[in-house]
Image: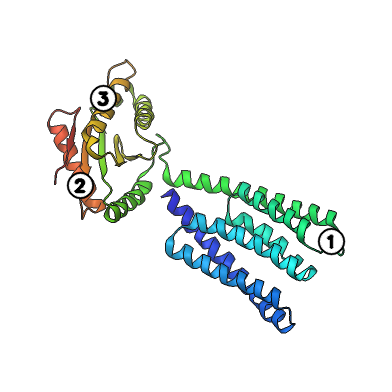
Amino acid sequence: MINQLQEKYQLSLLLLLSAVAILGVFPFVVIRFLDGNVSAAIIDMALVLGIIALVGYAFYSKEIRVTSAVTAVFVNAGVVAISIANGIGSFLWAYPVFAATFILVKPVEALCINAVAGFSLVALADIFDTVSMDSFVVTILMVSISAFVYASHGVKQFRLLETLNTVDTLTGALNRRAMSSDIQAALAKSERNGTEQLLAILDLDYFKTVNDNYGHAAGDQVLKEFVTITTSHIRKYDRLYRFGGEEFVLLISGVGEQQQTFIDSLRAAIKKELKTPRGEEITVSFGVAPWVPGTTADTWLQRADEALYLAKARGRDRAVFSHH
């Protein structure tokens, strides 16, 4: 879900910025052509067509991150080219382009792109007989640093928003909102590529007795430790979500024929490391549903829940796989 939110946000910025750029640049194509400045008109037209092509590619391919980076480099190269070709008449375009770079890519990346473009302008553009080089360097630095600070603050705010929207505040596991989005993405991936994936519902056995015997504060601490232990024994691309109460959902990808071994090893590790305040072991029951063609989010969760019910009925502290 986090990645999807970032992509939608970045795509909207790319579309808006590109629309503004096209509306701003295209009139100069006509003006420069009518003035007989054909080389500058060609460069401006290449910029317009290039931006349209990149935005179209981003929209249809969903490769937002890569396309935004290419666009940032492309427009910076374009402003250097047009400043060299048209001199002082196009020089001022450097300022909005340098600021806009921070909208397209990460702040550090934008700073590096701006630095390369700035040095290129100083080295190649024949404008400093009219414009003070010192003034140019200072003002470009001020624009880039100000944009860097603003963009860095925006990144921090966006990350905070992501955390608030996708992470369970008590345990640190991902929440149900993130789970719903990730399950849909996992289903799409499996339908497209046949990727083997597992969805497991985990339930802490007799968790109510922990709350009854030691209090809810101790129960909350057990849930936090459960998440810490579980995430330390799964891979970085596996995902753990809090489903509700003491139930959690685990989304696992690419374990192949080692499905049973992977789940049993995880269950044994939790049993060994998760303890009550008095050091008594806490076990976990697993209901596991492998992906099969035609699976939906609801049927996947239902199959895992049915398998969990069987695990409970058979004595808990075990993993049951759904074979429907």
The residue most toward the left is 314
Q: Secondary structure at mark 2?
A: helix
Amino acid type at mark 2: Gln
- Distance in Å between CA atoms under marks 1 and 2: 70 Å
Q: Which residue is mark 2?
A: 302
| Dot 3 crowding, Cα within 10 Å, few <14, some 14–19, many 20+ | some
Single out the mark in the foreground, 2 or 3: 3
| Dot 1 crowding, Cα within 10 Å, few <14, some 14–19, many 20+ | some
Determine if residue 275 is in view: no
Single out the mark in the foreground, 1 or 2: 1
- Residue 228 position, x and y percent, is 39, 29
In depth, the one of 132 and 207 nearer the eye is 132
Residue 37 occupies quadrant:
bottom right
Mark closer to the chain start, 1 or 3: 1
Q: Secondary structure at mark 1?
A: loop
- Residue 28 position, x and y percent, is 69, 76
Residue in the image at 56% along x and 55% along y: 69
In depth, the one of 197 and 84 nearer the eye is 84
Amino acid type at mark 1: Phe
Q: Secondary structure at mark 3?
A: helix
Vertical order, 271 against 98 (above or below): above
Q: Which residue is mark 3?
A: 268
Determine if residue 76 is in view: yes
Residue 126 occupies quadrant:
bottom right
Single out the mark in the foreground, 1 or 3: 1
Residues tagged 1 and 2 counted as in contact (Cβ below 8 A): no
In depth, the one of 120 and 293 nearer the eye is 120
Q: Which residue is mark 1?
A: 128
Mark closer to the chain start, 1 or 2: 1
Amino acid type at mark 3: Ala
Vertical order, 115 against 279 (above or below): below
In depth, the one of 209 and 14 nearer the eye is 14
